[in-house]
């Protein structure tokens, strides 16, 4: 969306951790321009969760969904020029925000049960450095001494 990420974060901080119904009510009465777009995005995420429960046979209780994560990241910036006195020009930047909302289902005791919309799961991978240490070998290049700058 073509809004500053800082302005979008002001609205997103209002709905983090809230139930979806409470978040929609909060967005409906927020006077920021970005609130309408965030509300549209939240409704889309809710419909995606509803689709997963109905069509894909994934067990999702739509009434227990809450906003797990709401983030506004920087997008590409548009550089513009404004005319200034005496033939000069001032540059200014029009910022763009990438808005991301993740919904999750809250369990009976309050903990997060399952992430529904917006987050992918990845397999556990072991970094290459820890594999080398596990086999008893030192990583390559650790035993060499570096020549000091200015040394003869």
Image (cartoon, grey):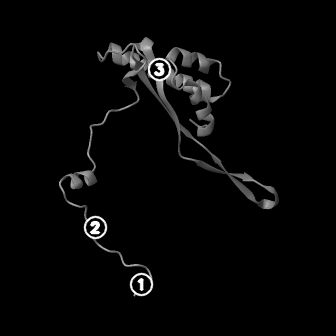
User: Residue 18 versus residue 81: which sits nearer the camera?
Assistant: 18
Q: Residue at x 73, y 57 (%)?
A: 89
Tell me which numbered mark, 2 or 3, is placed earlier along the sequence: 3
Q: Which residue is mark 2?
A: 141
Residue count near mark 1 (Cα–Cα under 10 Å), binned few <14, some 14–19, many ≥20: few
Look at the image and tell me whether residue 80 can be seen: yes
Residue 34 found in image quarter: top right
- Left or right, 59 with reference to 79: left
**Residue 58 location (% of width, % of height):** 30, 17
**Residue 90 location (% of width, % of height):** 72, 55
Tell me which numbered mark, 2 or 1, is placed earlier along the sequence: 2
The Cα atoms of the two marked residues, 2 and 1, are separated by 21 Å
User: Residue 126 versus residue 14: which sits nearer the camera?
Assistant: 126
The Cα atoms of the two marked residues, 2 and 3, are separated by 49 Å
Q: Which residue is mark 1?
A: 151
User: Residue 72 versus residue 83: which sits nearer the camera?
Assistant: 72
Q: Which mark is residue 122?
A: none
**Residue 3 location (% of width, % of height):** 61, 37
Look at the image and tell me whether residue 4 can be seen: no
Q: Are marks 1 and 3 in contact (CB under 8 Å)?
A: no
- Answer above or below: position of 37 versus 126: above
Tell me which numbered mark, 1 or 3, is placed earlier along the sequence: 3
| Viewport quadrant of the C terminus | bottom left
Residue 62 found in image quarter: top left
Marks 1 and 3: which is nearer the front? 1
Q: Residue at x 43, y 80 (%)?
A: 149
- Left or right, 111 with reference to 141: right
The Cα atoms of the two marked residues, 1 and 3, are separated by 62 Å
* SS under mark 1: loop
Residue count near mark 2 (Cα–Cα under 10 Å), binned few <14, some 14–19, many ≥20: few
Q: Which residue is mark 3?
A: 66
Residue count near mark 3 (Cα–Cα under 10 Å), binned few <14, some 14–19, many ≥20: many
């Amino acid at each position: 969306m073509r809004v500053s990420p800082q302005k979008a974060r002001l609205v997103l901080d209002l709905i983090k951790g809230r139930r979806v119904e409470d978040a929609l009510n909060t967005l409906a009465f927020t006077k920021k321009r970005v609130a309408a777009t965030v509300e549209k995005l939240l409704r889309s995420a809710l419909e995606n969760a509803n689709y997963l429960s109905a069509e894909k046979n994934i067990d999702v209780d739509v009434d227990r969904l809450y906003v797990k994560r709401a983030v506004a990241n920087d997008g590409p910036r548009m550089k513009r020029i404004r005319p200034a006195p005496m033939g000069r020009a001032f540059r200014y930047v029009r910022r763009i925000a990438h808005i991301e909302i993740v919904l999750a289902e809250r369990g009976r005791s309050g903990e997060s049960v399952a992430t529904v919309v917006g987050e992918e799961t990845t397999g556990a991978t072991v970094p290459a450095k820890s594999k080398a240490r596990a086999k008893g070998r030192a990583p390559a290049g650790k035993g060499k001494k570096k020549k000091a700058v200015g040394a003869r």
